[in-house]
Image (cartoon, rainbow, N blue to C red):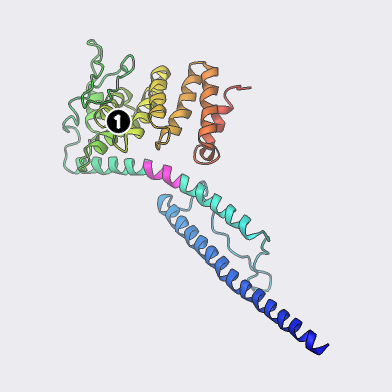
Amino acid sequence: MKWISAPKAATNAILGSLSLALIVVATPASAQVDNRLDRIERQLNALQRAVFPGGDDRFFEPEITPEANTSGQVTSQPQVTTSALTDVLVRLDAIEQQLARLTAATEVNENALAALETRIVAIENGAMAAAPAPNTTTAPADERPSGVIPVPEDTAEVELPEPPAQTAPSPERLAAVQAIAKPATGDAGDDEYVYGFRLWDAGFYPEAQQQLALFVAQYPNHPRTTFGRNLLGRAFLDAGDPRAAATHFFENYQADSSAARAPDSLLYLAESMIALDDTNRACIALAEFGDTYPALAVGRLSGMYESLGGRVDCD
């Protein structure tokens, strides 16, 4: 009996050693993932506070500190036990939402800061009122151009619609448009787009329409082209011309559905159709968005997607 039981004891000892080894291996791996997530979250929190100074709780929750008991000793809050995979997924969802907010804020802030710097320099030089027209091809007008601006595919020239002969911009409007400087960063295509963005952001929609149409025509393969087409559609939509806006939104989505602003254009196309009381096409655009961009439908564009879906009955 002793000769038979000895191997069993050895086997049990080996199995116990293997179990202990697996625990030792798994624990550092889990700790490594947890440490990496902690580091990413700390970096995102630091970046949030740089983008949104002041700790505004509209954009992120304040840090939670442990409470002190009556004896003056600090006690920790009990932790909710969840599986490691569930905890990682929850934290990754939070990181994705933070990145989406930071991406949107950064794009707006970059353009706003560039415009502010330009105006400060102009004020210091005493040249704000006498600044030259930033672009001789731009034809300011109080009324938006009629029709759809053609966008040629293989040419750097574009025929821009002329404003009505009887329409003349006021001196105040000319001065305001001239005060918006065109950047000169060395990337001509990017400079054209940013100038169009500044015109749109300042509310000069006809001028923005012409500038963005010029950019799209001259730089059809520029990384900013998808942004330019989408913003061109928004310039028409914001000016009260949803029919022309819809054309540009559709062209941007059709040109490359994987481009950065193609999903945005698809939602703005639905908004344009709603403005035109075309419920059928609005529902088609919303359904296409949900099928093509399921991640964005619950991520970066979830708010706009849900809002538009609530404005039409697509049953």
Q: Is residue 51 above or below residue 177?
A: below
- In the picture, residue 216 is in which quadrant? top left
- In the picture, residue 159 is in which quadrant? top left
- Is residue 119 or residue 215 the one in the foreground? 215
Q: Residue at x 50, y 48 (%)?
A: 96
Kindly identify which residue carries mark 1: 199
Give the residues in magenta.
Answer: 101-107
- Is residue 37 or residue 292 the one in the foreground? 292
Q: Residue at x 31, y 44 (%)?
A: 113
x then y, percent, for residue 189: 24, 36
Amino acid tagged 1: Leu
Q: Is residue 275 above or below residue 306?
A: above
Residue placed farthest to the right in the image?
1
Q: Main secondary structure of the magenta part?
A: helix
Total number of numbered discs in the rendering: 1
- Is residue 41 or residue 204 the one in the foreground? 41
Name the secondary structure under disc 1. Answer: helix
Q: Quadrant of the C terminus?
A: top right
Q: Quadrant of the N terminus?
A: bottom right
Instruction: Report the side of 183 relative to 100 (left or right).
Output: left
x then y, percent, for residue 94: 54, 51
Instruction: Report the side of 76 relative to 108 (left or right).
Output: right
Instruction: Report the side of 126 relative to 94 (left or right).
Output: left
Query: Does the segment drawn in magenta span residue 104?
Result: yes
Query: Does the segment drawn in magenta span residue 18?
Result: no
- In the picture, residue 165 is in which quadrant? top left
Q: Is residue 192 above or below residue 144?
A: below
x then y, percent, for residue 166: 23, 10
x then y, percent, for residue 260: 40, 38
